[in-house]
Amino acid sequence: MDWRFTPAPKPESSPTGVYPAVSQSDFQQVEQLWRTVYGREFGWLAAGAGGHLHADRYHPHSVYLLARVGGSPVGTMRLVRDSEAGLPVEQFVGIDKIRGSGDPRLIECQRLMVLPDRRNQRIEGMPYGVLAALVKGCLHWCLDNAYSHVVADLFVSTPTTPRAPLLALGFVETGLEFVDTELAEAGRSVALQLRIGELFSRAYRGGSDFYRYLMAPDPAIDVYR
């Protein structure tokens, strides 16, 4: 019996899927999504915000996932590795209780957004929608890069907060609340935490097609090195 692992051939790039941003054009698409959703839709960006919005102190430690449908960008998520710069949430609240013991490998997911006309839709190649595809991309990227825990910081009361779906997915409340002064939104924010192992074990402990979708190989999720 041959138990050796033989990777499946990497599929050709598809116009619909989730990919890490790598080119200048990719980063321009990330910027455009931030300005469209956080700027024009919600007014969370400072008036006259110019330059490269992503070029902050966390940028060297970040991966940007882009969701495209038919070649057009429709959503994005930033993954920030824990580093000497810390995690973005630490600008507002200490996370010693998240770090805890055992030296968990942490990554923070933030700037999660989907264009208004692509929210809550099933799309060919993304059967549970763009948000779920981005979550799947995050999950598989974390597995490939040996991260054990994901921290998510998010608003509590905004119309598009992903708090409910993330809690249903397996994120847990940490009890950490704060005001995100980086964005022009006065409402409360919270930090949630996910143990990657818990999420994957759910596919074996239950009968949900959704959790099987999160685990399954997928040509639309092109995040492996």
Image: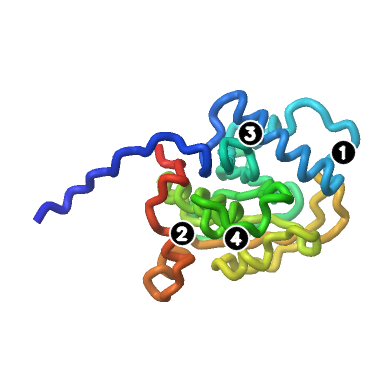
Q: Which residue is mark 2?
A: 214
Q: Say if 184 sits above or below 189 in the image.
A: above
What number of labels is visible? 4
Find the residue positioned furthest to the left: 1
Q: Which residue matches tag 4?
A: 98
Q: Amino acid at mark 1?
A: Ala
Q: Amino acid under label 3?
A: His
Evaluate if marks 3 and 4 touch, with contact meaning CB atoms under 8 Å apart. no
Report, in whole angstroms, how far the alpha carbon at label 1 lies from the one at label 4: 30 Å
Mark 1 nearby-residue class (10 Å; few <14, some 14–19, many ≥20): few
Mark pair 4, 2: CA separation: 24 Å
Residue 104, image x and y in percent? 49, 55
> Which numbered disc, 3 or 1, marks the residue closer to the eye?
1
Label 3 or label 1, whichever comes before in sequence order: 1
**As rendered, which of 48 and 216 lies closer to the eye?**
216
Q: Which residue is tagged 3?
A: 59
**Which quarter of the figure has residue 128?**
bottom right
Local secondary structure at mark 2: helix
What residue occupies the far right of the structure in this picture?
A: 47
Residue 38 lies, in percent from the top left, at: 78, 44
Residue plotted at (66% across, 35% down):
30
**21, above or below 18, in the image:** above
Q: Name the residue tied to disc 1.
A: 46
Identify residue type, mark 4.
Answer: Ile
**SS for tag 3?**
helix
